[in-house]
Amino acid sequence: MQRQLANMKQSLFDQGYLDEQFIQLEELQDDANPNFVEEVVTLYYRDSARLIHNIEQALEKNPLDFGKLDSYMHQFKGSSSSIGAKKVKIECTQFREYCRTGNAEGCKKTFQQLKKEYATLKKKLEVYFQVARQAGPVEKACRPK
Amino acid sequence: MDSSGFSSPRTDCFPAGLRVLVVDDDPTWLKILEKMLKKCNYEVTTCNLAREALDLLRERKDGFDIVISDVNMPDMDGFKLLEHVGLEMDLPVIMMSVDGETSRVMKGVQHGACDYLLKPIRMKELRNIWQHVFRKRIHEVRDIEGHESLEELQMMRSGIEQSDDGYFFSGDLVSGKKRKDADNKHDDRVCGDPSSVKKARVVWTVDLHQKFVKAVNQIGFEKVGPKKILDLMGVPWLTRENVASHLQKYRLYLSRLQKENELKATFGGTKNSDISSKDPTGNVCLQNSIAQNATTVQQNILAKESYAVSGQNILIHNDEPKICEGNGKVIPSMPTTVSKKALFGDTADLAKSSTSRISFNHSFGPLDSDVKSEPKIQAEYSWSAEVPSFQFKQEHTAHFHSDHGFDHLPLPMHHNQVDSLERSLAHNPGTSSKESDTRAQAGLNNRRNQGIKNVTQAENTAALFSVQPESHLTDCHAIDPIQCSIWNSKNHCLQQNLFDDLQSSQRNLLAGTGSALRLWGEEFNDYSSQGDFYPPNTFLGNIDPFGYSNHELIADVPPNLYESLKFDSEYPTDPVEYPIDQGLYIA
């Protein structure tokens, strides 16, 4: 079970879904907060849903308010950096770049991609936490090789 | 919050127990940072709104060692928060953002951030933040090196870690006092010689700030530099670094004020912003030159004059409503307009009524000098909240000043009453207006008596006295608010001098308090601009301790308030006019 968990995590890193920050979170997990990582990730998905909604609405405006979009995406990127959602963050950066150049099409396209990555990661992490719970608290944070 | 509570653990195992305030609108980061900081054995307080953070900081002035703030927050720009914290609390602030653009980081540093962390923030970075607190303390210790041996002794006794003022002077304090008391006490201790305000941390008291601004004024804002200011200020223990950092904050503050006013100003944005940005300067200049340059003889004369003027007080007051009318912004019949809600000054309208109320309250409420002073403070908030109607404020301030001086001095201070009354004012706005009305009546009588009494005291200065009130009246009648403000400042000076005469030491105390109050006043501009308004609470929290700690202190608070008011309002005074005024006094 532990090995399965380690493998899952490894593949999340290998495929570029997560970055170092996730390890940081795992290192913060202790007896006082045995489910710290999961709590943080849950919080992230709860809070970012609001942001995604805001961005979706802003993207329906015509013409696009790039300043506003950029500011939303800035927030979203900040949030995503908290759990180490690497792929999501990359999309955020791309999105902001399009905001800077005023590329509406680019923004919209990137946003679709972003949502996809966001949802994929969510699913993968859900499975991961499920396994982690089954594996029990013995699991210790370990850096992927 | 309690200095003595923290000080010992802090010395024992610094940096454990470092009190960190984290401000971020992102709940995820807040949670992570809290956990990280706790792992560092720091004491963490989190806050998801900048405004809330500021309230918290004001409430617990010495309750934190360092602030970590996000740059982008919906309710208040992190830079603005940073600026406030720098000016008011002088705490190290670390900014954080996911954005690492050089310009952003630069902005943070320019605004006084001691560090700028990029998200995702790592444990190791947080583990190290104590260095900023430590560095600051080292600087502070260095600042006071070479000062009185007594000071040094105390320093050594309390150790480097405890060199922040709260603990530092706790030996002088009655146990159970809060740190902010300590601050004031400290000022108290040093009183009698303003140039000897020494502290581990340089606290820019009103006195000191005045000197600073005066120097800036003399040099000219464009050509100003820390060294020049330092030379002009002539405060031996102050270092070039102290001045430089204060100058930086001051500039930032002015530029922000200017920006704000450009946005807010309803009558001639540019004009107003100019006024506001230079306010402190002009006003301080006025005060200073009179207070400091005046010979003792002049001071005596002035003092007497102010007594004498109080005889004319009623007249003056009566005129004031008219002035307001002239500007078309206030309903002349003050007592009726007096709005209790105004105390809280949530909106511009309210603020208007509150201002009128203030003036009345103050002019007619001599029953209890302290009572008056407190309401004023609140009034001050409401009015400064009312950024747009600038000229307005000035006039009202005028009332304020003048009234105050008179009520205040002759009367004994009942600080307990003050506090309770003040509370009732603040908390039961509904009843307050009644109260003030009643008081107004009683006060009127009182005042008359008082005035008479004072006039007799004035005796030989009769001639001076007659000249003086005229000038006041003239000013008052002139609808031009600028004139009014001049008048205010004059009165203020009188007061100031009076105080000097009566008890120079008290003045220092006042100065100390004043600086804090002034800052509050300034902050409230921001509050108002953002629509939220919590001043009464904050204020109460902060001011009460003064009252309890020292009866005299309270008596002194009001003059400082004036000072703070002036900062905001009196710059419009035409510099040319100022000398003339002074001339009048001297004559």
Image: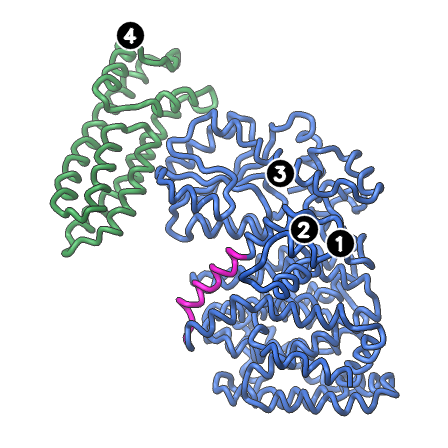
Chain painted blue? B
Residue under pointer 1:
B187
Q: Which mark's residue is nearer the viewer, 4 or 3?
A: 3
Q: CA distance from mark 1 to mark 4?
A: 66 Å
* Location of residue A129 (image quadrant): top left
Residue A12 appearing in the image: yes
> The residue tagged with tag 2: helix, strand or loop?
loop
Mark 4, residue position: A3
State how far apart marks 1 and 2 are (Cα).
10 Å
- The answer to which image quadrant residue B497 occupies is bottom right
Residue type of the residue flagged with mark 1: Asp
How far apart in space, not on screen, are marks 3 and 2 (Cα)? 13 Å
Tell me the chain of label 1: B
Q: Amino acid at mark 2?
A: Val
Q: Mark 2 — on which chain does it sit?
A: B
Q: Which chain is green?
A: A
